[in-house]
Amino acid sequence: MADKNTPLKGKALLQKFNELAHLSKRERAQGCGYYTVTKDNQIRANLADFMNALLEARGISLSPEGAKDGRGREPTYRVSVHKNGQIVIGSTYTQEMGLKPGDEFEIKLGYKHIRLVQLGSGAPDEAGE
């Protein structure tokens, strides 16, 4: 087997997978191009990549909203009050809004809600105040 390999994807992967039905999982992965050659010329099957490619070829996506890099958590759009009484808005939300350090907000308290209105944004208040 060569040092450079091109793993199969889609229909080609499924077809080859079925042709290699008599082999073990590791041998199937290698036969479909999901392997690496170590420094001492040992062949290692990349089972995780192989299984993910199989799922994708069968139309099963593990990340429905697109490609993620796997770091961090998904935003929940919820916060809780800390023991010290503070509410922290995470960087995920501030980045999504394009906020920069030093941006200022006016806090408007309502019945069971808090509204943050950015100062100096030039946008009129939603409530028309």
Image (cartoon, rainbow, N blue to C red):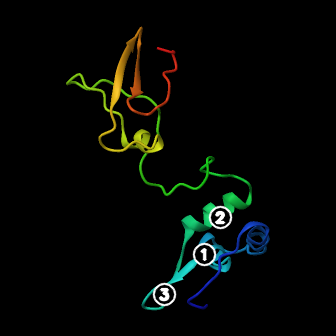
Q: CA distance from mark 3 to mark 1?
A: 14 Å
Residue 51: % across, % down:
62, 63
Q: Nearer the viewer, mark 3 or mark 1?
A: 1
Q: Mark 2 to mark 3: distance in Å?
A: 23 Å
State the SS at label 1: loop
| Figure disc tally | 3
Q: Is residue 61 above or below residue 116?
A: below
**Left or right: 79 as drawn, with respect to 45:** left
Q: Position of residue 18 (x, y in %)?
A: 77, 69
Asked if the residues shown at circle 1 and circle 2 are in contact, with their CB atoms under 8 angstroms apart, the answer is yes
SS assignment at label 2? helix
Mark 1 Cα-neighbour bin, 10 Å: few <14, some 14–19, many ≥20: many
Note whether 5 is above or below 80 in the view shown.
below
Where is mark 3, residue-wise? Answer: 42
Q: Earlier in the sequence, mark 3 or mark 1?
A: 1
Where disc 3 sits, the SS reads loop
Q: Quadrant of residue 81?
A: top left
What label sits on residue 105 in the rendered view?
none
Along the line of sight, the residue nearer the viewer: 43 or 21: 43
Residue under pointer 1? 34
Residue type of the residue flagged with mark 1: Tyr
Give the CA separation, mark 1 to mark 2: 9 Å
Point 42% across, 89% down: residue? 39
Amino acid at the residue labelled 2: Ala
CB atoms at circles 2 and 3 under 8 Å apart?
no
Q: Quadrant of the N terminus?
A: bottom right
Residue holding disc 2: 53
Residue at (58, 87) in percent of width and height: 4
